[in-house]
Image (spheres, rainbow, N blue to C red):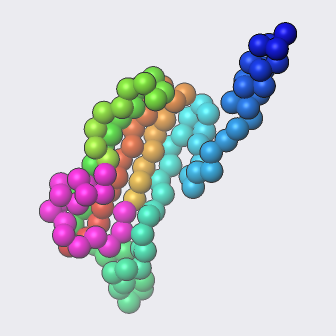
Amino acid sequence: MKKAIILSGLAAAALFSGCAVEQPRGMIYSDYTINHGDANAYPTSSGAKVDGLKKGVSTANGYVGPLVAIGDASISTAAKNGGISKIYYVDWKVNSILGIIEEYQCTVYGE
């Protein structure tokens, strides 16, 4: 009886606990982009993003939830891939289907 109470308590804690994350997560499907950085760090007269900035991309993939993850979606790798030494802003794109197939892409803009 004591084991059943402990196990049911642990199951309830796992079911109702959550993480404080800064981005939305869909249980079935996620496809969103989040900007990390000041989009006006390299302003124009209109305050819009400047065309002609260098762009670097890095990607990582996950399979079967947290069991398999490969790749490097870091800011430093994206900057290196784009030949960028001065970063102005960063976009993160996430695509996930049932948490089984996931792709994370980091795009860095700068000079």
- Above or below: residue 70 compared with residue 106: above
Q: Residue furthest bottom?
A: 45
Task: Tell me: 26 left or right of 64.
Answer: right
The residue positioned farthest toward the right in the image shown: 1
Quadrant in which residue 92 is drawn: bottom left
Give the number of callouts.
0
Could you say where residue 48 lies in the image, as x and y percent from the top left?
Answer: 40, 78
Q: Is residue 15 among what the camera can see? A: no
Q: Residue at x 23, y 73 (%)?
A: 86
In the image, residue 4 sits, relative to residue 38, either above or below, namely above
Q: Residue 93 in the image: x percent, y percent? A: 42, 49
Question: x, y percentage for residue 111?
Answer: 20, 73
Left or right placement of residue 84 versus residue 100 in this view: left
Q: Is residue 10 left or right of residue 64?
A: right
Seen from the viewer's position, the closer of residues 76 and 33 is 76
Quick one: which residue is furthest to the left in this view? 83
Seen in the picture, residue 48 relative to 91 is either above or below; the reply is: below
Residue 47: x, y in percent? 42, 83
Q: Is residue 82 magenta?
A: yes
| Magenta residues (range) | 74-90
At 67% from the left edge and 41% from the top edge, which residue is drawn?
18
Q: Dividing the picture into quarters, in which one does residue 44 lie?
A: bottom left
Say whether residue 59 is visible: yes
Instruction: Report whether 63 appears left or right of 108.
Output: right
Q: Quadrant of the N terminus?
A: top right
What residue is at 36 percent from the left and 47 percent from the top?
Answer: 105
